[in-house]
Image (cartoon, rainbow, N blue to C red):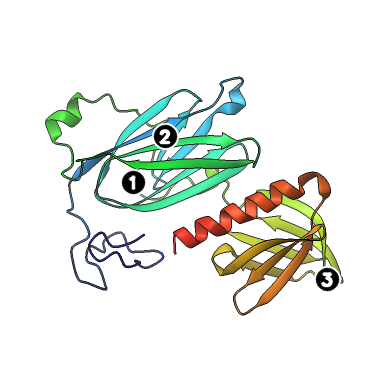
Amino acid sequence: MNCPSCGKQLPDKPNIVMNYCPMCGDKLYDPGIKYLMEIQFAGQRDAESTVMMIYVDERQFFKVIPGENICFALEAGFHTIKFRYKIRTKVISFLVTSSYVIKTYYNSLSGLIETNINIVEDSSGGIDAETLAEKELTQPVLESENGERAFDIMLGQDEPEYEMKVTSGLKEGMLRLYYERIEFTAWSDRKVDVVPYRQIVAVRKKMGAIDVECAGNVHKVYSIPKDIYNEILAFLTNKVSEARENM
């Protein structure tokens, strides 16, 4: 996330009450102003499993199926939206100072949730109470009563997206890919090597394995089963790209 005034990068996890840029000192947003958020789920509706779950700030929970849209209001400020489709999760954190339309779909080739975020033109002034009252907003399936984070268990964010047996150097073990990190557990000593995606410089092919280059020219090479090799490569490449965008 960047400051709308100076364009410089804001802290990784800005406090929800932070309202001034630590670099230029300009105000980031005007509290109390409300904006519309529309999410469009593209794809083919063929079964109950096509339901996508959407969590807004871990306070509201929505369900949407392909071909349907949901619309809700957000106050100006920092927000996080999590998309969940089957075992896949994608997280978007951003500073809301305009209305948005987010088009999302599940890419069956890469096995990833794709999103296209568009700002609604001339919407920075927000939406007035009268217009908001006339809008048909989508009611959440569940909503936190106390206004705090309440859906961590439902989201299952600690479950790995992928889990497979691999070798890394001379060690054999289990490789688990989470939505924000890689974990390799060696069977020999049961030690867990954790690599956050934000620390990864590049992901490359290497003779049937994947070379994960980390900061400081550190390379971690994992053998990957042939049947999911391309899918894992696409998944890691996408996660590293997302981590860079959010830095």
Three-letter code for the amino acid on which mark 3 is drawn: Gly
Distance CA(mark 2)–CA(mark 3): 47 Å
Return the x and y of residue 220 as percentages of the image width and height. 72, 70
Residue 169 image label: 3
Give the residue drawn at x 14%, y 34%. 129
Element carrying mark 3: loop
Three-letter code for the amino acid on which mark 2 is drawn: Leu
Q: Is residue 9 above or below residue 123?
A: below
- Dot 1 alpha-carbon crowd within 10 angstroms: few under 14, some 14 to 19, many 20 or more: few
Q: Residue reaching furthest top?
A: 46
Give the residue drawn at x 65%, y 78%. 217
Give the residue drawn at x 69%, y 62%. 204
Distance CA(mark 1)–CA(mark 2): 12 Å
Q: Earlier in the sequence, mark 2 or mark 3?
A: 2
Q: Residue 111's image quarter? A: top right
Return the x and y of residue 162 as percentages of the image width and height. 70, 49
Return the x and y of residue 97 as percentages of the image width and height. 24, 49
Q: Earlier in the sequence, mark 3 or mark 1?
A: 1
Q: Is residue 81 above or below residue 7?
A: above
Let me know if residue 47 appears in the view: yes
Mark nearest the camera among 1 and 2 is 2
Q: Quadrant of the N terminus?
A: bottom left
Residue 146 image label: 1
Element carrying mark 2: strand
Q: Quadrant of the C terminus?
A: bottom left
Q: Which residue is mark 2?
A: 142
